[in-house]
Image (cartoon, rainbow, N blue to C red):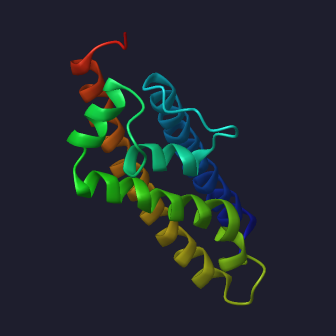
Amino acid sequence: MTTATIDALMLEYAWTVHDFQHLAHSLSLLTAAINADEFEERNFYSDVEALTMAAAESRGHRALLEQLTAEDKAVLTRLKGARDRLVYSFFVDHRIDRDNADVVAREAREKLNALRADIKEGRKVLDRAYAILAEVGEED
């Protein structure tokens, strides 16, 4: 694999991580806005659970749990796996020092494309969630 190929792959990876971090930050702000952040140590997984399976903590939280569809919740749940693939296993699964580096690079790009599609779907769900919360209004 050439240095240019490695550089391009690293850039794609970095932008995918950036997009995921932006999504995770937005999710964290949303869970704080609905007062669903009672966990001692909040993290991405607990934020997803707050929108998919937790008991309602506030009027806004209740509205989200009622109005997010089963598919919306499934998209959010899938993001936990996407995060793990991006953070924990991406370069373990796609070793760029192998003899078949061109194949590895192609497979890595395919994985990044799939991860970016997951992120895009997650963003759409969060946009809907923020719209729902805006309709409900501020908490008392």
Q: Nearer the viewer, residue 107 or 38?
A: 38
Residue 14, image x and y in percent? 64, 49
The image quarter containing residue 65 is top left
The image quarter containing residue 3 is bottom right
In the rendered image, the residue lying farthest to the right is 97
What residue is at 47 percent from the left and 57 percent from the top? 79
The image quarter containing residue 10 is bottom right
Residue 20, image x and y in percent? 54, 46
Residue 91, image x and y in percent? 70, 70
Side of 79 where 134 appears, left or right: left
What residue is at 57 percent from the left and 58 percent from the top? 83
**Where's the N terminus, which quadrant?**
bottom right
What residue is at 56 percent from the left and 47 percent from the top? 46
What residue is at 50 percent from the left and 70 percent from the top? 111
Figure check: 24 above or below 87? above
Side of 63 where 86 appears, left or right: right
**Where's the C terminus, which quadrant?**
top left
